[in-house]
Amino acid sequence: MLELDQVRAGYGAINVLWDVSMRVAAGRLTTIIGPNGAGKTTLLRAIMGLVPVGGGEIRLDGARLNGTPTWDMADRSVAMIPEGRMVFRDMGVEENLIMGAFHKSHRAHVKQRLEEAYEMFPRLRERRTQMAGSLSGGEAQMLAMARGLMSDPRLLLIDEPSLGLAPLVVNELFEILVRLKAGGRTIILVEQNTERAVGVADHVYLMQSGRVALSQPASEVQLQQLHDLYFAR
């Protein structure tokens, strides 16, 4: 579904990704792990057009994706749930969700998508009129995930969903990831909780210093070997 071929990308004169090649199969969950500064978030931003690609190519269903403006990604059925929640704090929960389907091609399905969001995240239904800025960290992450799903994307990019959350909330979020995967959603998950990330994944990539250090089916990953590579031991 998604292919990255020798991709280079970065910020101005600072290059972060060095000839990164990956394959993301349709209907599968691909997880990308690695230490801070490995280039994981930059990779997601490059896919979304938030960071210019300086070399190589990104293809979605065989068609070139890099060079597509970020605001046109909804037309390509691609959505990203960024690190740090980034909800609209001064808007209500339901208003935040509606913003996820703001693109004109998705507005006709808002009511249906809202009901699906509330079914998947019952706590959001209870807080539908509450200001997003007053939510707990876990509730805000649920809102960010639900908002990302409002456009019903074929490809969903999720950046560090468990960061800073209590273990019980992390369990809830990973249960939702399992449900999304079972429903056939194609997901790229960036996550530092290696054991949980590998546990839900179909394929695992380890990045270090802007390069792919490991590519392996999740069923073949040995956590000790993975951790040795992770910490460059």
Image (spheres, rainbow, N blue to C red):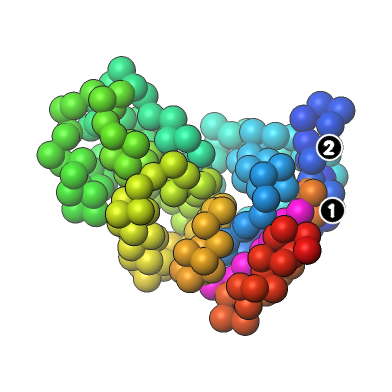
Secondary structure type for disc 1: strand
- Label 2 crowding class (10 Å Cα cut-off): few <14, some 14-19, many 20+? some
Q: Distance between the residues labelled 1 and 2?
A: 11 Å
Mark number for residue 15?
2
Q: What stretch is highlighted in magenta?
A: 202-208
Q: What element carries label 2?
A: strand
Comparing 84 with 35, the one in front is 35
Whether residue 147 is visible to the viewer of this picture, yes or no, is no
Question: What is the quadrant of residue 46 in the picture?
Answer: top right
| Circle 1: residue type | Asp
Residue 79 lies, in percent from the top left, at 49, 44
- Dominant secondary structure of the residues highlighted in magenta in the image: strand
Residue 21, position in %: x, y? 77, 60
Q: Residue 101 falls in which quadrant of the image?
A: top left
Q: Classify residue 39 as left or right of residue 177.
A: right
Q: In which quarter of the image is residue 14?
A: top right
Q: Please give the name of the residue rendered at 63% of the width and 43% of the height, measured from the top-left corner.
A: 41
Asked if 82 appears above or below 202 in the picture, the reply is above
- Is residue 207 covered in magenta? yes
Above or below for 32 versus 91: below
Q: Which residue is drawn at 70% across and 60% down?
A: 230
| Residue 70 numbered tag | none
The disc label shown at residue 19, or none: 1
Quarter of the image with the C terminus is: bottom right
Task: Identify the residue at horizontal 78%, vertical 36% (top origin).
Answer: 10
Out of 103 and 204, give the one closest to the viewer: 204
Q: What residue type is labelled 2?
A: Asn
Residue 58 rendering spot, x and y as whole percentages:
72, 52
Which residue is found at the position 53% from the left and 46% from the top?
159
Judge from the rendering whether residue 114 lies leftward or rightward of residue 34; answer left or right: left
**In the rendered image, is residue 185 in sight?**
yes
